[in-house]
Amino acid sequence: MNNWDISYYIEKYCMQNMISKFWLNLTFLVFTVKYAALEEVGVSDCSTEEPHYRYLVYPGEIIFFNCSLPTYKPIQAEENTIQWFYQKSDGSLEEVKSKNNLNLSVNGAALQISPLERKNSGTYMCRMKNVCMKMIVHVEDMESCPKYGPKSLFFRTIDIVSLSCPSINCYQGQNITNVTWYKTEKFLDVLSPDRFFLTISNNNIQFSTMYVEDTAIYTCDYNLPMNGKEWIVRATINVSVDVPDTQNPPDILDPTNGTEIKAELGKPFNLKCRIRFGYERSFNPLIKWRVVHPEVKEKLSGGRSLCSNTDYLKGYICNLAITLDTVTDNDLHKIFECYAQNTVGNITTTVKLSKKEKDVVFLIYVLCISVVGLVIVLVGAGAVYVYWIEIVLFYRHYMSKDETVGDNKDFDAFISYATQTSEFSEETTEYSFNYEDERFATQLLPSVLEDNYNYKLCILQRDILPGGAYVEDIAKIIKKSRRAIFILSQRYITGPSLFELEAAVKCSLEEQESLKLILIKMKPFKEPETIPHIVKKALRAVPTVAWKGDLDNKSAHTTKFWKRIRYYMPVKKTRKM
C-alpha cells in the first residue's frame, strides 16, 4: 500500500463521519510522514535482525555476494536500485562505494571483494526496493587449511578437466551438503543445454571438452554446520582457457628460398620478408635480415617487424622490410638471408640481387600502345570531320527538339531564284529557254524538302498572290521565314532577283540568329562590278552549297548535297509516314 492508497481510505472514512477538513489534512500529513520514515529506516531495521546468511571464505580470492533473500530469486545486474552497506563496530552503517573502498565494489547487483582480505570480515547488508538482506562474512586464515586448492587455473582446449572446489578438502569427513556451482559474478548456472560434454559429478565440474568461452570465475558453495549455525563456505577459481601453442617452427611465405630479385643500380631497394607463425600464448618472435659472408652473418640494421593476429587457429602473419639506400655492384654479389624464430625452432630463406636491365620489350609495348592509341584518335577525329554532318543529323533526329515550335514564323525557308521574267544578261552563255534555276527551285526543292522532310517552303509564284508593293512584300515574307535559300547563277547575279538577296542580308542583320541564309551555287558565275557591297560580303561569308547533281535523278535527295542543305535548315521533326 502506498501513500495515495492510505490517503484514499482516510478521506473516505472522514467523509463518512463528517470530520472537518482541518483534521483531514492533519491526519493525512501524519500518515505520509510516518510511511516515508518507515521506508527510510528499512536498512536500520534489518541491522537488528538475525542474519539471513553466514559466509565462510578464504583470503586472496575474487569473491562475489548477490543481493537476494532465501525466498527471492537472485537479482540480476540490470537492477540499479540496490545499495550495499557495511556495519561498523559501533553499529553504524557505511554505504559501499568503489571510490571509497580499495577492494570493495558493487558490480551490478553483486558485492565484489577483490582481493579478499582478513579485514573484510564483518556484517554486510543490501537493500533492494523495500527488502533488506543481512549477511555475516568471516574470512578464515589460510593457515587453517593447508590443503586449500589453487585459486587460478590455466587449461588448453585439448585438456580433459575435473574442476573441484578449492576449500572442500579443508573439511573432509564433515557434514558437507548442497554443493552448488555458479559462473561469473551474475551467478549463472554452470550447466547449459548447449554444453553436452559438461557435467557435475561427485561435486566436481567435469569438462570432457574445453572451449575458450569457458574462461570465467567459477564460484562453489556448500553448507557446513558449525557451532550450531548453518554456514555457507564460498570459494572461487579463476579459470583461463586457451588453444594449445604451436608445435611447428615458423614458415616463410615470401620470398622463396634461392630467389633472384631484379634490382636497379643506383636506386633504393626494399627487401621484404613475410612469415607465418603458429599461435603461442606468449608470442615473442625474432625476425631479421642479414648478409651471409663465408665465415660470418652480418645483421642488416633498420626495418621493423609488423605482426597481425588473424585468429588463434591460424596464428600470426608478420612482415619485415628493410631498405637498401643505394644498390651497388657489390650488393649484386651478396647473399641476403631472412631469419625467423619462435619457441619451437627457426627457418631461413636466402635471396640474391641481380642487375635489372632496361625492359626493351616493355618500352616497345608502351610505344606500340601509344602509336595505336594515337592512330585511333586521328582516325576517330578524321571520321568525325568527314561525317560531321551525318552525326549532327543523326543527333537531331533522335535527341534534339523541334526548333520551329513557338517562334511565330510561317515558313521554314524562303526560296529566291531567277524567274523566266528575269532579264537576260549579255554576259551569260545560257539560252533563254533553259530555266534550270526555276525547275530546281519549284520542282526539285519542294519534292525533297517538303515531301521527305516536312519543311514548309515559300515560293513566290506558288504561295504569294500577285499584287501589292513588291519590295515591302519581299521584306515581310523573308522576316516570316526561318531560312532564306538563294539559287545562284549568272542570270540571278545579273538579274532583278538579286534584290531579294540584298533584302535578306539586311533582314538577317536585323533578325540576328532567327534568320539564316543558305546559298546554292547552280553554276559558276562572275560577279559584276555593280553588285552591292553588302551582297558581295554575303557571298563570301554565307555558307554556300554547290549543286552538281542531275535534275532528272529521282534519288538525288540521298546525296551529300541534300545532307548539307538539311544541316543548314532548322531542326524539325520528320512527318511520320
Image (cartoon, helix red, strand yellow):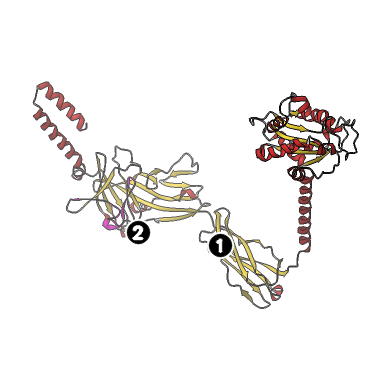
Disc 2 and disc 1: Cα gap in Å? 48 Å
Report whether residue 560 is seen.
no
Quick check: is 113 in the magenta stretch?
yes
Residue 310 appears in the picture as rendered = yes
Q: Position of residue 570 (x, y in %)?
A: 71, 35
Q: Are marks 2 and 1 in contact (CB under 8 Å)?
A: no
Residue 478 point in image, percent of width and height: 70, 33
Rendered residue at 50%/43% (across/down): 197
Quarter where residue 554 is shown: top right
Q: Residues within 10 Å of mark 2 (few under 14, many from 20)?
A: few
**Residue 306: mark:** 1
* Kind of residue at disc 1: Leu
Where does label 2 land, which residue? 146
Front-most of residues 133 and 153: 133
Q: Secondary structure at mark 1?
A: strand
User: Where's the N terminus, which quadrant?
Assistant: top left
SS for callout 2: loop
Residue in the foreground of this view, choosing between 493 and 141: 493
Above or below residue 198? Residue 314 is below
The single residue placed furthest to the bottom in the displayed view is 295
Look at label 2 and name its amino acid. Answer: Pro
What is the span of residues highlighted in magenta in the rendered image? Answer: 92-119
Packing grade of label 1 (10 A; few <14, some 14-19, many >=20) is few
Query: Which quadrant does the C terminus fall into?
Result: top right
Quadrant of res 465: top right
Magenta span contains residue 190: no
Taking the spot 33% from the left edge, 38% from the top edge, the residue there is 73
Residue 576 placed where, x, y %? Answer: 74, 25
Residue 196 located left or right of residue 346: left
